[in-house]
Image (cartoon, grey):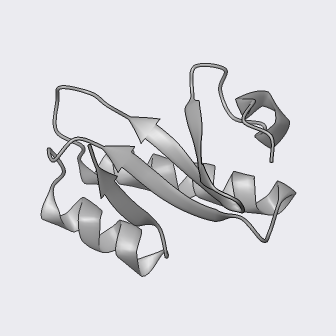
Amino acid sequence: MELNPEVYKLPARTQLRAIDENHIGIVKLIKSRIIQKDAVRIVEMSTQIKDVHPDLKVSLICTSNICSKSLALLQREGISVIIK
């Protein structure tokens, strides 16, 4: 599993972390709240990752500052959330 964001055609500033074999995390440890607009971008990133490696499971690694609409959108898209 590759953790270089450029392999998945993601911006170079995107942080990826291996969680398990066939499980990758998009790291968003920011002080501000993750809103629905951010969640849409995360879903797009997940889609790009799955286009390259369809068998990978994708999660979001973030702080507890995430709005309920974002959380619902991510769960609907099959992206689990790991709170750090």
**Count of numbered labels shown in the rendering:** 0
Q: Position of residue 3 (x, y in %)?
A: 72, 36
Residue found at the far top of this picture: 13
Q: Is residue 12 left or right of residue 19?
A: right
Give the x, y percent position of residue 63. Answer: 22, 41
In depth, the one of 34 and 1 nearer the eye is 1
Q: Position of residue 29 (x, y in %)?
A: 31, 31
Vertical comparison of 50 with 84: above or below: below
> For the point 48% across and 50% down, which residue is it?
42
Q: Residue at x 47, y 67 (%)?
A: 79
Rendered image quadrant of residue 68: bottom left
Q: Say whether residue 70 is left or right of residue 81.
A: left
When the figure is inspected, residue 52 is found, relative to residue 31, above or below; the finding is below
* Residue in the picture at 39% in, 67% down: 74
In-front residue for pair 5/23: 23
Residue 53, image quadrant: bottom right
- The single residue placed furthest to the bottom in the displayed view is 76
Q: Please identify the residue farthest to the front as the structure is shown.
A: 20
In this rendering, would 33 be left or right of 53?
A: left
| Residue appearing at x 40%, y 80% in the figure | 76
Q: Position of residue 47 (x, y in %)?
A: 66, 60
Quadrant position of the C terminus in the picture? top left
